[in-house]
Amino acid sequence: MNKTLLSLALLASAGMAQADEVKFVTNAAYAPFEFVDENNEMQGFDIDLAKAICEVQKMDCSFHNQAFDSLIPSLKFRRYHAAIAAMDITPERAKQVDFSDIYYENSAVFVTPTDKFDNLDALKKETVGVQNGTSHQKYIQDKLEADGMAARPYQSVQDALLDMGNGRINAVFADTAVVGDWLAKNQGYAVLGERITDDDYFGTGFGIAVTKGNQALLDQLNEGLNQLKDNGTYDSLYQKYFPQ
């Protein structure tokens, strides 16, 4: 075996080895899934879930904060091992990274000032705030742009919601749980229309993304998820962040 083939073989075997340390990357501006608290610590459903997986799988894990649209490139360039960031599993993303089993079933909604619009048709000529690089942005571009709706990208969904609060835009399109968390703290706004669960964009659910081909880590994450569901930890975390 020549040196090049030997190097490739060593890399492949290293990639299949079970992980003792996992560097997670996220975008901690998406409550209740991930956010930074008053002590500058990352919190949220995704963070707690990842920590619990690491505990049962006996892995040392660290968490790193980046812009959402840089998460997949960071995995492709192997700066991090995994991304957990309320990331929809879509066919386009699955070409670039591998995903764990679904850990959260997702949907999306439009939120607007109360009594501003009668129905979704009234939004067709509006500019709608979205987080850059998300399924929400792509959904508007693919499905609604031809009717006159424009997606205005923001670094975070919180920036979009702030702009709506300041009257610069009249609507934001985001995940149902994120909108619900924001509405609980902000009066004068409401969901417009029904939840959207298009499988190509939202309906499949959230998964933990890993570098393409890292099957060993994927197996560990899935095994950890199954353990958490079996021992009741998953249900406890779900109730903590998404109480009925």
Image: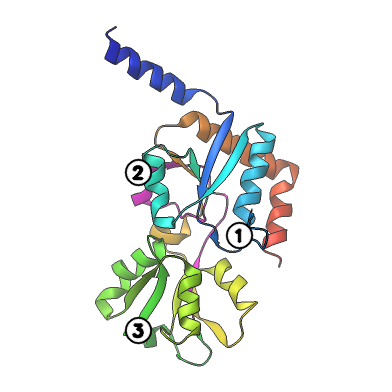
Secondary structure found at label 1: strand
> Badge 2: few (under 14), some or many (20 or more) residues near its Cα, within 10 Å?
some
Question: Which residue is under mark 2?
Answer: 96
Magenta residues, as a range? Answer: 85-111
Apparent side of residue 35 relative to residue 87 in the rendered image (left or right): right
Q: Name the front one of labels 1 and 3.
A: 1
Residue occupied by mark 3: 126
Residue type at mark 2 is Gln
Q: Is residue 138 left or right of residue 81?
A: left
Residue 189 is situated, as x and y percent measured from the top left of the image, at 55, 85
Residue contact between numbered discs 3 and 2, judged by CB atoms under 8 Å: no
Residue bearing the label numbered 1: 36
Which image quadrant is residue 223 in? top right
The residue lying at 57 percent from left, 32 percent from top is: 21
Q: Which mark is residue 74?
A: none
One can see residue 110 in this view: no
Taking depth in this image into account, of 183 and 229 the one nearest to the observer is 183
Work out whether mark 1 precedes mark 2 in sequence or the reverse, and give the earlier one.
1
Percent across and percent down for residue 145 are: 28, 74
Does the rendering let one see residue 20? yes
